[in-house]
Amino acid sequence: MRIKQKLLFVFLVLIMAGLPSLAANSTFSGMVRDYAAVRTQTMDMPVHEQTLDAFYEHTTDSGQLTLHPVVYSNPNKELQLDLAEAYFDFYLERADVRIGKQKVIWGEAEGAFITDLVSPRDMRSFILADFSEIRKAVPAFKVDYYAGLYTLQGIWVTHFIPTSLPASDSMWVQTPTLPFPPAITSVSFTEPAMPETTLDNSEIFLSLGRFGNAISWKLNGGYVFTDEPLASSVTAPDSATRVIFQAYERYTFVGGSFNTALGDVVLRGEAALALDKPMNSLDTSINPPITIEKHTQVQALIGLDWNMAGAQWSTQYLMVYTHDHTASLVFQMKPVREFAHTFTFRVQDTFFDEQLTARLFAYIEAEPLNALIRPSVSYNFGNGVLLEGGFDLFLGDEDGTFGTYGSNSLAWAALRWYF
Amino acid sequence: MRTHRCHQTVFLVIVLVLGMSALVAADYTGEQVMWEVYNRDSGDTMRANLVMTLTNARGSVRERSIVQYRMDTEGVESKLMFFLSPNDVRNTSFLSLSYEDGRSDAQYMYLPALKRVKRIASDGKNDSFMGSDFTYDDMGSRHPDLDTHTVLRKEQIQGTSTLVVESIAKGNEDYPRTLSWVVEGEWFGLKKEFYKQDGTLGKTLSIGAFEQIDGISVITDMTMKDWEKQTSTRIQMKDVAFNLDLDDNFFTERQMKMGPRG
């Protein structure tokens, strides 16, 4: 970390810590976490990270300022300082306006992204200490207009922000093996080309929702970029070398979500239709070997939540269908199936007056059969101090979304202090 | 002669006891008392700061602070709670809508880390309220038709005249029999005992303090003791205010995200 950056960080922390004493309507809160993970197969410790996740909020009659700096410290790496969010909220009688760098969460799915496409993802690590850290903030103007039980929401994301992918030296990086002829000995990817920062290249989202006791629903839509890059062209500097250029492409989606109660059971659902979604087609027997095709894609999820035997239970089924499917379709150079089926399952119970919490969360992909199983426990000492531990177990077929990380199964522990 | 006087005394006592019982019975039936309790003026809207102190069997103490808003309108009781402490749950909010017509409660939780309001599976009325010794049923107003009620006697408690009402649940309950000490004329309970299915005492609710605020009797300090688990929960209410300018627009997803008012 450079000296200027260090000074900026110290200055920021001092300002944020000092502001509440100057302003009665200000709060400074957050969390400090120490998180360490050991790979169960190799018994090495790829992660031992300290995190400061802080919030400064200043409230007035008309609105609120929120600053959300995050600092990550990893052994032998530079301190990573990020202003995760920074926005102003203006509260009007029938509308709220939020301006600035913000995270927006849409939909009813847990652990899946169907209409939840406003904020891109931080996928540098497949497993995060907190799932809430997976979303990246976007620079945006967001307006919520309220009319009784109805809310109309419009979002203008001024600059496209892509999903962050694992670094080339990360344990989570997936190096595709492309079926080029043996004569081609070198295949490389360029850094994705970012869209120009023009008005034309901004993203627009619109939502209409109703918050009802019998049923709550939302209709969503957006004109967006693919959050992950596509291979846009291939060049051949020489006969043995291929260079693959990457870029982000446009498409439109429409969708919706709902939740309702069936007695003591909550039923929720979410679906999205991606219209002419750009996808890569890979066929090294033709020229060019990689092209962009447009296919309509449907994602649909149904979920149930209920309480039983004192515990909270939840299950979901997610289906993805790609229209006009061909065997050459790939996503991030991995084959796309015409139908993909994923199930999730969660159970959570508390013991000792809610001080000890035990959880089990599982993703199961049906074809090929593979899974991520995440058992964990946390003990709350009170006064905001929690000790946690658990396993992230990647099981099953190595061609699957989870099974491919079979050698990265983790045992982990974390200590948190909320202030 | 002595025998005759003795008989006279016994007769007088019997007449007095029967007369008193008849008077009590004539004044109020158990049903009437519990309907008076149910219909007691508790303000159309209310705001209060709650401090919940949970003590476990080892004497270890945990504290939770909550701001609670309540509104009663046409058969619906709306409650919105904002958690202020401990720090790990700060800014979490909980909205519940309870219906007099017996429909299941609608319950929503806002988790600030997830920035999402989730409809949650309705907890059973007999389940613990946030890990405390109170159930959701204890925190609300139990409908009188769910039990049959009998006035057993009058009794002085904390220098106040109360009617002791026995309530027997019509359905299957964890505590099928309760005794309530109801202040005559004011119609709020000063004490309540909960008896388990085997007839033994399971829990006792005792009132530490009550106040008149805006003409409404308010219990500002109460403790629930669980005799089996040897745990207790004390709830203290502070800064109680009634008849605030709240409407349906306050008990919404928008307010859950925005936080408490004022």
Image: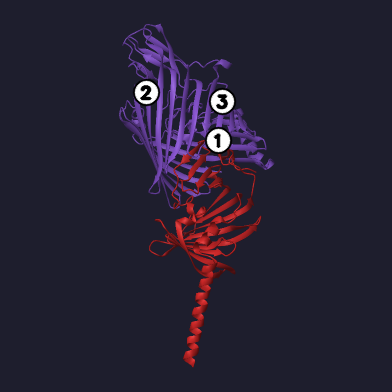
Q: Identify residue for label 2.
A: A321
Crowd band around label 1 with a 10 angstrom C-alpha radius: few (<14), some (14–19), many (20+): some
Q: Are marks 1 and 2 on the same chain?
A: yes
Q: Which chain is indicated by disc 1?
A: A
Give the letter of the chain under mark 3: A
Badge 3 and badge 1 both on one subunit? yes
3 vs 1, front mark:
1
- Residue at image position (45%, 56%) is B146
Q: Which mark is residue B147?
A: none
Residue occupied by mark 3: A155
Chain B painted colour: red
Mark 2 nearby-residue class (10 Å; few <14, some 14–19, many ≥20): some
Measured in 3D between alpha carbons, the distance from the residue under mark 3 to the one under mark 1, in whole angstroms, is: 20 Å
Question: What is the CA distance from the residue labelled 1 to the residue labelled 2?
Answer: 33 Å
Q: Is residue A163 placed above or below A52 in the rendered structure?
A: above
Residue A149 disc label: 1
Residue B88 visible in the picture: no
